[in-house]
Image (cartoon, grey):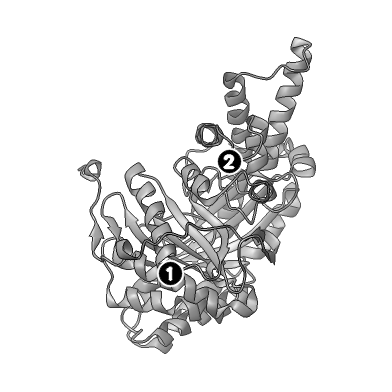
């Protein structure tokens, strides 16, 4: 049993170290909203979301006030809309209409984001899947809080290269459709391999078909807490050894990260259980991902520097990130029996000031970030690239990340933003949790022939397990 007093022990983490509960996300099944009539489908979707989640924001704010821990976002995720619209959506415009209904419902209940304008096409695309995908640029341009995701591959099925090639065009088109809004469209679009059914984090959240009718998932965060713990650890080692140059060994380093992750996860467990009880919705999972923000001191990059690399991107960075990710998971699973979602370290560029600093110092490029995604929680995340980057190059980047996920049996994703009219060295500003980003260079050699071959890259041999 988790007690309130246990949570109150974390007050210093909140006040000095940027601890927060990043999100309470209510997953809602819309399977019973499907109808052959588009108007009826939209009405059912709106009514179900605004009924089940009507008290979500109020409940989150109430819990936050009572325990003194910020709950930054309240969000909703829904069943992948390509499944819901299959019977009633016959044009791109029909899917845009559903996206606008989702946006209206989200604004009515006051949540920050709604995820699930999604399609799962890891092995092939139905007509409904393709229509939804082609509607994404317009859907994101005409809504404010709707987020979209497309799963193009998995360890069990391989990589759907037709979908990968199409997503290269969609990312470009989404940027073009929102160029008057700082090209924000692709910032609300994630392309996945091995997408989880219970991820509470945007833009990739959707409510998997294996889930209950409604569920509460909580995402905790605490890069600043981990950084502070490591700094205090090294200070104590210097005092104990009476040596200003002394540092902790890896055994102590790992123990410190595990213990800190345990405390962070217990906070999330308490919030999740309280939200579940008050909303009368089953508790799903805790996602204990270290999700940074643009705030100073709330950075995964700064943790890597505490571990010992001068800048993220320096030799040793991938090993440091692998260790961090593993210790966070080990600490988290001791604190909760229901750890799920992504649960690791996020390395978005625009949302992490330390990552931005590393890019501007010349220490970090896309190729090194790709190497780091082999061991971190997700993938190439919130990376601004030149607006004239070819769609085939974007598709090649998606294919590379999908291959990492497929072969390593992990979730990987791509969220890159081609910024129309900007080139390498310039900056783009979004504000809020999305932050700001330098425009990063992309390999100029072509992958056009590769991504245009079509068909499917087969699943790896280790996928055949029954």
Q: Horizontally, is 44 left or right of 259 in the view? A: left
**Residue 162 is drawn in which quadrant?**
bottom left
Q: Which mark is residue 313?
A: 2
Considering every residue shown, the one lying at the far top of the view is: 241
Work out whether mark 2 precedes mark 1 in sequence or the reverse, and give the earlier one: 2
Residue 201 or residue 346, whichever sits in front: 346
Q: Quadrant of the N terminus?
A: top right
**Residue at image coords 35%, 57%:** 210
Q: In the rendered image of this protein, does residue 388 appear above or below residue 209?
A: below
Picture coordinates of residue 413, whole percent (x, y): 45, 55
Q: Quadrant of the C terminus?
A: top left
Q: In the rendered image of this protein, does residue 196 appear above or below residue 416?
A: above
Residue 359 or residue 345, whichever sits in front: 359
Secondary structure of the residue carrying tag 2 is loop
Q: Horizontally, is 244 left or right of 153 in the view? A: right
How busy is the neighbourhood of tag 1: few (under 14 within 10 Å), some, or many (20 plus)? many
Could you tell me how far apart the alpha carbons at marks 2 and 1 are, in whole angstroms?
26 Å
Instruction: From the image, tell me which residue sits under label 1.
Output: 391
**Residue at image coords 73%, 47%:** 67
**Residue 86 is drawn in which quadrant?**
bottom left
Secondary structure of the residue carrying tag 1 is helix
Picture coordinates of residue 175, whole percent (x, y): 54, 74
Residue 448 or residue 302, whichever sits in front: 448
Q: Are marks 2 and 1 in contact (CB under 8 Å)?
A: no
How busy is the neighbourhood of tag 2: few (under 14 within 10 Å), some, or many (20 plus)? many
Q: Is residue 6 visible?
A: no
Residue 196 or residue 135, whichever sits in front: 135
**Residue 239 is drawn in which quadrant?**
top right
Q: In the rendered image of this protein, does residue 122 appear above or below residue 1?
A: below
Q: Is residue 230 visible?
A: yes
Picture coordinates of residue 448, whole percent (x, y): 35, 65
Picture coordinates of residue 424, whole percent (x, y): 61, 61
């Amino acid at each position: 049993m988790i007690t309130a007093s246990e949570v109150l022990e974390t007050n210093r983490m909140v006040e000095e170290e940027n601890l927060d509960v990043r999100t309470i996300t209510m997953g809602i099944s819309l399977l019973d909203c499907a109808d052959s009539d588009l108007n009826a489908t939209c009405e059912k979707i709106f009514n179900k979301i605004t009924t089940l989640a009507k008290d979500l924001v109020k409940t989150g704010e109430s819990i936050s006030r009572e325990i003194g821990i910020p709950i930054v976002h309240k969000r909703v995720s829904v069943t992948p809309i390509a499944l819901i619209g299959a019977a009633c959506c016959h044009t791109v415009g029909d899917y845009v209409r559903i996206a606008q209904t989702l946006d209206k419902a989200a604004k009515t209940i006051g949540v920050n984001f709604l995820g699930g304008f999604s399609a799962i096409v890891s092995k092939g695309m139905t007509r409904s899947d393709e229509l939804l995908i082609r509607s994404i640029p317009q859907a994101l341009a005409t809504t404010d809080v709707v987020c979209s995701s497309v799963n193009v591959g998995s360890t069990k099925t391989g990589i759907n290269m037709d979908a990968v090639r199409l997503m290269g065009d969609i990312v470009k088109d989404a940027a073009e459709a929102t160029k008057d809004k700082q090209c924000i469209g692709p910032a609300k679009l994630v392309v996945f391999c091995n997408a989880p059914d219970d991820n509470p984090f945007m833009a990739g959240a959707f409510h998997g078909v294996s889930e209950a009718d409604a569920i509460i998932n909580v995402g905790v965060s605490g890069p600043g807490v981990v950084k502070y713990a490591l700094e205090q650890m090294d200070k104590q080692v210097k005092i104990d050894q009476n040596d200003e140059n002394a540092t902790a060994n890896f055994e102590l380093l790992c123990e410190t990260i595990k213990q800190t992750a345990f405390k962070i996860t217990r906070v999330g467990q308490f919030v999740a259980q309280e939200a579940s009880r008050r909303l009368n919705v089953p508790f799903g999972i805790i996602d204990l991902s270290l999700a940074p923000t643009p705030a100073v001191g709330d950075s995964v990059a700064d943790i890597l520097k505490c571990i010992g690399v001068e800048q993220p991107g320096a030799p040793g960075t991938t090993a440091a990130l692998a260790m961090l990710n593993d210790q966070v998971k080990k600490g988290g699973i001791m604190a909760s029996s229901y750890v799920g979602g992504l649960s690791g370290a996020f390395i978005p560029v625009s949302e992490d000031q330390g990552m931005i600093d590393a890019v501007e110092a010349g220490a970090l490029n896309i190729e090194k970030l790709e190497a780091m995604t082999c061991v971190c929680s997700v993938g190439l995340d919130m990376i601004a690239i030149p607006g004239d980057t070819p769609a085939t190059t974007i598709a090649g980047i998606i294919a590379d990340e999908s291959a990492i996920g497929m072969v390593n049996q992990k979730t990987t994703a791509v969220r890159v933003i081609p910024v129309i009219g900007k080139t390498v060295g310039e900056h783009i500003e979004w504000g809020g949790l999305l932050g700001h980003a330098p425009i990063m260079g992309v390999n100029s050699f072509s992958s056009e022939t590769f991504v245009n071959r079509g068909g499917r890259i087969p699943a790896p041999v280790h996928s055949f397990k029954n």
